[in-house]
Structures are given as C-alpha cells and as structure tokens.
Amino acid sequence: MLKNLHVRNLALVEEVDIAFGNGLNILSGETGAGKSVLIESIAAALGGRINRNMVRQDADYALVELEFRIEEQAALDALRILEIPVDEDGTVLVSRRIGEGRSTIRVNDETFTAAKLKAAAPYLLDIYGQNEHQTLQDPGRQLALLDEYGRKQIFPLKEECASLYRIKKKAEAGLKALSMNEEERLRKLDLLAYEAGEIEDAALVPGEDEELETEYRRLSNGQKIMEAVNAAHSFTGYDMNGAGDAVGMAVRELSQIGSLDPEAENLYQAIEQIDSLLNDFNRDLSDYIDSFSYDEESLMETENRLNVINRLKSKYGGSAESVLKALEDRRREIDTLNRFEEEKAEAEQRLAKASKDLEKTADLLHAERAKTAARFEKEASLQLKELNFAQVDFAIELMKKPECGENGADSIEYMISTNPGEARRPLRQIASGGELSRMMLGIKAMFAQQEEADTLIFDEIDTGISGRTAQKVAEKLAAVAENRQVLCITHLPQIASMADHHFLIEKTVAGGKTRTVIRELTEEGAVGELARMLGGAQITEQTQRSAAEMRALSITFRKGRKAET
C-alpha cells in the first residue's frame, strides 16, 4: 500500500506530506484546488511523463517521494524479478527529482530509468485516470481487459501465439527470398559464381593483408633504413672514433686502477659490462645489415598483391577475414540456388507448419477466451446491477478473423442493453460517459481480487452520475476498499461519506503567492466537508444535519458489510 506521499514545488504545491491509511482514502476540494496534480505527481514518480513547466516558478526543482509497504507475495516476487530493491520489511521508497535540465529517479537510494520503473508500477499501484472509461469503447481495450481477467490461462497462450507469429513471418520472408523465376535464378548464379571466383583466385590467407602492409612499409623505406643502420653500426663500432673503440679504451684505463680503490673496481666492472653490451649490439646491427635485402622487384610484387587484396576488401569487407566470409556466404547461396526447388519446397513446408501451429494455438486461445468471456459476462452483469444498472443485459461477442496475428485471430465487441425490451447493441454506440464510468468501476471491482498492486487510485470516478447511482458507486468503492487500499478523488458527497480517511485539498493565498495545501480531516471536519459538498456556498443547519446523517448511514453500511463477511 501507499503509506506516504511527499510533494515539493510542483504546480501550486509548495510542500505537502500525506500519510495515507488502509481502506478508502478520499480526496476532495473545490475545482482548481490541485487535486489532479497529486495524481499526476504519483504517476510521474513512477516513470510517467511530466511537463517541466509544472515546477513552481520560484523553485529550481520539484520533488515527489512515494513510500510503499508491499505485503502481497506475488507483487514482491514480481518486483524482485524486475530488480526493484525492496527492504526486508517490504518498504519501497521511490523519489523523482525534476529539474530544469534533467530528471532523476531513485528507488531505495538506487538510480533507475523511467522505463524500468514504469514496468514495475503495476505491482505498486493501479491508477484509474480521468476519461479512462472512454477506452472501454475501443475493441482493443475490451480484448485486453478480457485477457487480463483470464490471465493465468490466456497469457501463456498469447505468448505462444506471438512466438509462432514471429516464426511464421520469418518463414514467409524466407520463402519470399526464394521467389524468382528461372532467368533470375541463373542471372544470380552467374553473379555469385563470378564473385566467388575472384575471391578464390586471390587465394587469401587470414592476416595476410596486415603482414603485407608491414612488409611494404619496410621495402618502400629500405634505403632510408639501411642508411640509418649503417650509420649506427659505424658510430657504435670498434674502428677509429667509434663508440666501441672509445669504450674499449676506457676499459683498459680503469683495469689498471681497480686494485687500488674498491670504488674504482666497481666503475671498472660497470664499464666492462657496457663494453660487452655494446659489442653484442654492434654484432646484432651487423647481422641485421647482412640479412636485410630489398629491391624494386620485391617492392612491386608486394605492392601488386596489396592492391589485389585492398580491392577485394573495398568490395567485400574491411579485412581479409571479411572477404573470406563473403566467399563462404556466396558458396552457401550458390548451393541454395543449385538446390532451388528443394530449398523452395522446404521453405513452403516450414511456412505451412508455422501457419498450422499458429492456427492451432489461435484456436486454443479463442476457446480459452470464449470460456473466460462467459465468466466475465456473468460477473460483470452482477457488478453492473450493483451499480444501478437494474435491467442490464451485457454480453461479449467474440468473433474469429480470417487471419491470425500475434494476438490470435479474435475480434471482440462488448454488447449491452440497459433498458428492458431493447436489443443489445455495441457498447461504443450507446453508453454515456456516466455509464462508461460505472462500467469501468464494475470491471475494476472484478479485478480487485486478482490485482498484484495493493493500491487502486480513482481520479474522479463519479463523472456524469448523481443521486441513487452515486450511492451505488460509493457502496462499490467501499466494497473494493475492504480488500485493497483505495485513493479516490471525488466531487460527490455520497462517495466522500464512505471514507476511512478524508483529505481536504485547498488553495490558499499568502504573501501574494497561491499554494495548494492538504490536510486530513477529523470526523467533525469530514462532516463539515460533506455539508459543503451538499450545500455549496450556502451551508445551513439542515445541510449540516443531512451531512451528519449521510456520514452515519455510510458508517452503518460499512459495519453491516463487515458483519456479513
């Protein structure tokens, strides 16, 4: 559940700190007080998009912090799979800092990307936003809700369907690549044979290009190399004025005094070692000079070979290895084209098998969806009747499309009649905003028992309803809140009266600045807020009594439900 919400410098909010409780948490206030900003801040903290213009004008940054206490084992397991850190007591602390240039998200002091946290959000809470009920008119959303309802049986089949669809598409691409006439096949064979032949004629060896480049540098600079080596040999040699001759003279001089002074002996040994090293070095130079050979013919041969290799590299890849791989690829293509009819037949068989497997899985998925639809219809009808659809006739029309996709071969239509004697018609054609809102609440109530998230948030679920219908919606929210923490923004006193915790959101002006403040109401304050919601600007004693009565009836209703369970 969501234990605490802390918001700083967001829109009209300077700083608020709200400790939410179990059950039904109601947030109410005048229009424009900033109720929806709280929902937006929660969504933003969990990786949602946010407009940086919402940072208060007099602030450098905005901050949103959420503290969750996760108790459901399924949610804990899912979070750990997603590598979301969870404390031993189930605490997850999420913070998002929104600055002018960037935004930073942290979970229990570890930095996270918005995308990764967004994937984990459904296991922390479920937000039912304003106008979300409109998505009920979309057949794609209708099918997604059905699949979610039967997820244990349906999701594995959906995953298998998606996998087989990808296999089928790959098989189609493979067959398409073999779709050519005899003239095209022969023309392609000629080109491949020519390309393979020119690579084979070159008789490349892996790494040969690098060795030749080194040799080419040596040969093309042969004269310069020999001049430098000969000069070095002369300077370090034992001829007159050579370093070897000078060092030899130094050795002779120091050998005569080594016995006269221990330090002189050390110097003698050092110069003797230098003489030995210099002698070896000079000999190595001599061997190098004797072994070094270069001529114009060797240079030309190396240059010609490099030109052949570099031309192939420019055509088939950046190295000798890449050229040799290109040869293997062409040999393989030649083999395929020589076995064209056999390859095509095998490709057709692979496509036929993939199509058959996909259709078989799609049939299983359709059958499972049909069974789930029957359960969905039955429970949805019960939920809708409890939400003041007294004569509702609700059904799901599940049809098979001729082509299978990665989501199977099903199309769907929610059908409904809300008046006796009227035929069922597509939901998208007849339902009003208020009816759609109630239907979505009924569906959310159906899912409440199987939701991984402990917390459900409803942002103005009361759109387009009033009177007895509003009372039924209030009772349904109270029922859902018996098993889940519910946060609900509302304008209706019937819903607010069911609160376990009631928070008032107000807009105040102080020091020339407008800001939003939030506080939890006492029981007396909650009744006063109900009176305001009932009476508007004019609150009479009668309004106060009505509010107190409404609150008392709601408490009685909830006690009665607890006694029944």
Image (cartoon, rainbow, N blue to C red):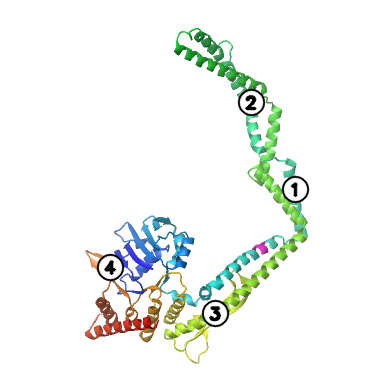
- Location of mark 3 (residue): 373
Residue drawn where x is 75% and y is 49% of the image: 193
Q: Give the Cα distance between marks 1 and 3.
A: 62 Å
Front: mark 4 or 3: 3
- Location of mark 1 (residue): 194
Q: Give the Cα distance between marks 4 and 3.
A: 45 Å
User: Going from the N terminus, do you reach mark 3 or mark 2 first?
Assistant: 2
Q: Give the Cα distance between marks 3 and 2.
A: 86 Å
User: Going from the N terminus, do you reach mark 1 or mark 2 first?
Assistant: 1
> Magenta residues?
169-173
Q: Is mark 3 on a helix, strand or loop?
A: helix
- Location of mark 4 (residue): 517
Give the image quarter of residue 398.
bottom right
User: Going from the N terminus, do you reach mark 4 or mark 3 first?
Assistant: 3
**Left or right, residue 273 beside residue 209:** left
If the image is split into quadrants, where does the C terminus sit?
bottom left
Tell me the amino acid under the disc marked 2.
Gly
- Comparing 166 with 135, the one in front is 166
Q: What element carries label 4?
A: strand
User: Going from the N terminus, do you reach mark 4 or mark 2 first?
Assistant: 2
Tell me the amino acid under the disc marked 3.
Ala
Q: What element carries label 2?
A: helix
In the rendered image, the vertical position of residue 200 relative to residue 362, given as above or below: above
- On the question of residue 10 being in view, the answer is no
Whether pointer 4 and pointer 1 mark residues with C-beta atoms closer than 8 Å, the reply is: no
- On the question of residue 83 being in view, the answer is yes
Q: Which mark is residue 222?
A: 2
User: Going from the N terminus, do you reach mark 1 or mark 3 first?
Assistant: 1
Front: mark 1 or 3: 3
